[in-house]
């Protein structure tokens, strides 16, 4: 048995029956990482020593935790106490958080073992992981392709058997798009479902932490752990958390599925369209009913997002001045030190975003850009509210194309931003959405199906995804590494 390919649920079962130990699992993963990560480069830090110590600790404690003994990776913009957290930025190089994020704190309480921190586009700004300040991660299905981003390291690690699961963050698609590109499952929860405490802020009104896994059941399991109200995050919601691992099993007979016409337009790769249309048939075969719907403001989503996300980023990133965190450059005066630190510490894309956001917020332009974008955001949110009066879920492709080549879009930011076209509205509206594998291109690259739900209705999203997954084998394919 190849332990590194186990699902969380399967590994947990074997641990409980004492057929394997947490050390067996961890050693198998570390071996896999040693063989594979030279090619894929998913990890910024592998926490080998820490993980062995952690196992000693959990072996003394209660073994009934939901994640007891399970090696899981964490995106490197989620704070882990005592373990460096870089956001793949030079400006945070060497930063060791003095506190733990709420999401990982909850995972610790359930006995998980951190196996490492994964690569991302610097401060989660990007769709390919090429904006990492350290190195580019490769897609496990084809090393010349991007794994997507910004949670590219997390998705690549899960897809290549270097972690049983991972958590990532999603501001405009950063969990779902890499999940689609790497052939794994990725869920962006409803805004407010999972605490953002300890997630390094990019665009605070959009950011959410969520699971990246090899099965829907595993995503449900992780959601059970990380969801729920947290007094440390005033935007986290006091909404009851169902047992998602149970609710996924219910049938989807009679479920109404909206198929938005604005998502099946020119520019959509025909193989992606074909796979998604097939997936809709599978759902219909399970008793769901498909209806054509319209989300009329879809075409404004990319522009709206790139004004709001950059505006929030320009404010959030003001704190990196060489005084409080990580890297500090030399300067002849205090102001000079601030400027040098930011000039040397931030990469090109991050600087571009700070400038765009500062511009959109500046006097004289605020009304034309930031305020207008907020108004359009409301219209986009209302599109979804109206649609969900008639349907229970909405299905779309996760991305317009399969994974593109490394280098293909990096010199053309607009092309890169346009890749987010199907994921971004979901963040603007705050609704939950999952990406599940639904096929492969003729070049052997994975294709993702996106299922979107009502606010706080992850239950239906996961249930539809699970029912679909039970009918298909796509999620069982492994990359030929
Ligand atoms: N690709 C989008 C961006 O560059 C989304 C990133 C994300 O979700 N963190 O902003």
Image (cartoon, rainbow, N blue to C red):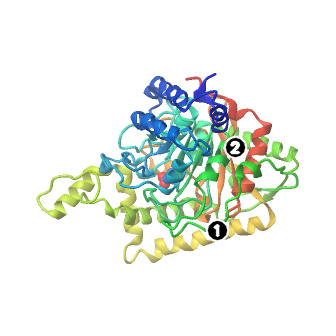
Q: Nearer the viewer, residue 17 or 312?
A: 17
Tell me the quarter of the image containing the C terminus.
top right
Indicate the quadrant where residue 43 lies.
Answer: top left
In the image, residue 171 above or below residue 377: above
Residue depicted at 68% across the width and 35% down the height = 475
Q: Nearer the viewer, residue 265 or 324?
A: 324
Indicate the quadrant where residue 1 lies.
Answer: top right
For marks 1 and 2, give the CA distance: 29 Å
Circles 1 and 2: CB atoms closer than 8 Å: no
For label 2, count other residues whose C-alpha is less than 10 Å away and answer few (under 14), some (14-19) or many (20+). many
Residue 472 falls left or right of residue 363? right
Q: Which mark is residue 217?
A: 2
Q: Is residue 415 visible?
A: no
In the image, residue 3 above or below residue 99: above
Q: Secondary structure at mark 2?
A: helix
Q: Is residue 102 visible?
A: yes
Residue 206, given in percent of the width and then of the height, sits at 53, 62
What residue is disc 1 on?
Answer: 381
In the image, residue 450 above or below residue 141: below
């Amino acid at each position: 048995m190849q332990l590194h390919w186990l699902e969380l649920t399967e590994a947990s079962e074997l641990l409980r029956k004492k057929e394997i130990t947490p050390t067996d699992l961890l050693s198998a993963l570390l071996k896999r990482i040693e063989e594979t990560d030279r090619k894929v480069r998913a990890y910024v830090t592998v926490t080998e020593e820490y993980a062995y110590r952690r196992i000693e600790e959990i072996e003394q404690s209660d073994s009934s935790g939901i994640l007891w003994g399970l090696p899981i990776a964490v995106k490197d913009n989620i704070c882990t106490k005592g373990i460096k957290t870089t956001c793949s930025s030079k400006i945070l190089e060497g930063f060791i958080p003095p506190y733990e994020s709420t999401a990982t704190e909850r995972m610790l309480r359930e006995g998980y073992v951190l196996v490492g921190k994964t690569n991302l586009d610097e401060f989660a700004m990007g769709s390919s992981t090429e904006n990492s300040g350290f190195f580019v991660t490769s897609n496990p299905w084809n090393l010349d392709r991007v794994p997507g981003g910004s949670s590219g390291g997390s998705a690549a690690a899960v897809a290549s058997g270097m972690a049983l699961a991972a958590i990532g963050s999603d501001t405009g698609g950063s969990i779902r798009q890499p999940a689609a590109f790497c052939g794994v499952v990725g869920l962006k929860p409803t805004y407010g479902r999972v605490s953002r405490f300890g997630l390094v802020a990019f665009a605070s009104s959009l950011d959410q932490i969520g699971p990246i896994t090899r099965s829907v059941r595993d995503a449900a399991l992780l959601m059970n752990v990380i969801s729920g109200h947290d007094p440390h995050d005033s935007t986290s919601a006091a909404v009851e958390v169902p047992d998602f691992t149970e609710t996924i099993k219910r049938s989807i007979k009679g479920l109404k599925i909206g198929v938005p016409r604005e998502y099946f337009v020119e520019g959509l790769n025909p193989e992606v369209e074909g796979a998604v249309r097939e997936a809709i048939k599978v759902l219909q075969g399970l008793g769901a009913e498909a209806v054509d719907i319209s989300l009329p403001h879809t075409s404004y989503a990319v522009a709206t997002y790139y004004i709001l996300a950059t505006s929030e980023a320009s404010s959030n990133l003001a704190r990196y001045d060489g005084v409080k965190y990580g890297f500090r450059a030399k300067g002849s005066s205090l102001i000079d030190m601030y400027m040098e630190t930011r000039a040397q510490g931030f990469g090109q894309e991050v600087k571009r975003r700070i400038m765009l956001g500062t511009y959109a917020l500046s006097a004289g332009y605020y009304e034309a850009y930031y305020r207008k974008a907020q108004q359009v955001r409301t219209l986009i949110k209302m599109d979804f509210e109206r649609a969900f009066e008639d349907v229970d879920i909405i299905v779309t492709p996760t991305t317009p194309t399969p994974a593109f080549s490394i280098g293909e879009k990096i010199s053309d930011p607009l092309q890169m931003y346009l890749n987010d076209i199907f994921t971004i509205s979901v963040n603007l509206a705050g609704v939950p959405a999952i990406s599940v594998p639904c096929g492969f291109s003729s070049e052997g690259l994975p294709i993702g199906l996106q299922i979107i739900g009502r606010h706080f209705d992850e239950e239906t999203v996961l249930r539809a995804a699970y029912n679909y997954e039970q009918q298909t084998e796509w999620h069982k394919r492994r990359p030929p590494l």
